[in-house]
Image (spheres, rainbow, N blue to C red):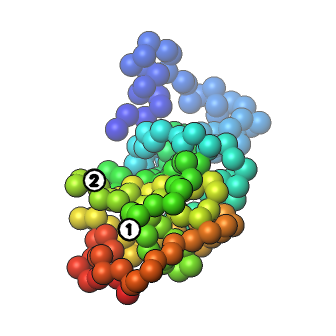
């Protein structure tokens, strides 16, 4: 991993001289901030996540500020788009707030900790989309690395900040498995 000073030298910009920073006491706080940026830059790279169409909805902000530092045992990392989040390196769980609200559907719908989710398996990843909440939140995860039950439970408090206006309905109990588990849901 290159430091900011190494990148500036590689890009042809002059390398900062430490003697100038030491010469100005008023720049002490700037130096501390700079060290903080260098230390934080040594973590996982920023995840490239495309923002959802309604990512600027103020209700998304309510959920985003409540997201946990870890989901399914994976640490949160920075993303490059508004109303998005990622956990794990490489990403095991990706969240986007502001996706289109699903209408009535026959797709599998489960409830975990009071949050209703429409579940889809595309063969490589699972997608969970909140049902009965506007704006909707979409979570994409790798079920070989993260159990759906952990993902849903870990995100429930933050997702619950978006008021429910509807929910899953079924005429009979579903026997389809919850993604990432072998047992049928109740």
Q: Dot 1 corresponds to which residue?
A: 108
Residue 146 position (above or below residue 97): below
Which quarter of the figure has residue 25? top right
Q: Secondary structure at mark 1?
A: loop
Residue 125 position (above or below residue 164): above
Furthest-top residue in this view? 12
Position of the N terminus by quadrant: top left
**Residue appearing at x 55%, y 24% in the figure:** 17
**Residue appearing at x 42%, y 49% in the figure:** 43
**Residue 126 is at least partly visible in this image:** yes
Specify the label residue 149 is tagged with. none
Which quarter of the figure has residue 140? bottom left
| Frontmost residue, 73 versus 12 | 73
Q: Secondary structure at mark 2?
A: loop
Position of the C terminus by quadrant: bottom left
- Name the N-terminal-most of marks 1 and 2: 1
Residue 126 percent across, percent down from the top left: 33, 59
Residue 163 percent across, percent down from the top left: 69, 67
Residue 8 percent across, percent down from the top left: 47, 22
* Label 1–label 2 contact, CB within 8 A: no
Q: Residues within 10 Å of mark 2 (few under 14, many from 20)?
A: few
Gap in angstroms between the C-alphas marked 1 and 2? 13 Å
Number of numbered discs visible in the structure rendering? 2
| Frontmost residue, 177 versus 87 | 177
**Residue appearing at x 53%, y 80% in the figure:** 113
Residue 20 position (above or below residue 56): above
Side (left or right) of 81 relative to 121: right
Residue 10 percent across, percent down from the top left: 39, 19
Q: Dot 2 corresponds to which residue?
A: 122
Furthest-bottom residue in this view? 186
Labels 1, 2: front one:
1
**Residue appearing at x 71%, y 42% in the figure:** 29
């Amino acid at each position: 991993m290159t430091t900011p000073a190494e990148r500036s030298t590689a890009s042809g910009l002059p390398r900062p001289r430490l003697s100038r920073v030491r010469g100005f006491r008023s720049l002490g706080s700037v130096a501390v901030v700079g060290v903080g940026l260098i230390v934080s830059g040594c973590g996982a790279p920023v995840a490239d996540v495309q923002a959802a169409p309604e990512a600027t909805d103020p209700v998304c902000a309510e959920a985003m500020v409540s997201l946990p530092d870890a989901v399914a045992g994976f640490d949160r990392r920075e993303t490059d788009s508004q109303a998005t989040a990622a956990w794990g390196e490489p990403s095991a769980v990706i969240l986007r707030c502001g996706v289109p609200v699903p209408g009535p559907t026959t797709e599998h719908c489960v409830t975990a900790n009071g949050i209703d989710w429409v579940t889809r398996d595309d063969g490589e990843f699972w997608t969970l989309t909140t049902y009965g909440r506007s704006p909707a939140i979409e979570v994409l995860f790798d079920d070989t690395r993260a159990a759906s039950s952990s993902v849903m439970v870990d995100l429930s408090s933050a997702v619950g900040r978006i008021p429910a206006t509807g929910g899953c309905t079924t005429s009979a109990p579903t026997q389809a498995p919850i993604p990432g588990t072998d047992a049928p849901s109740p």
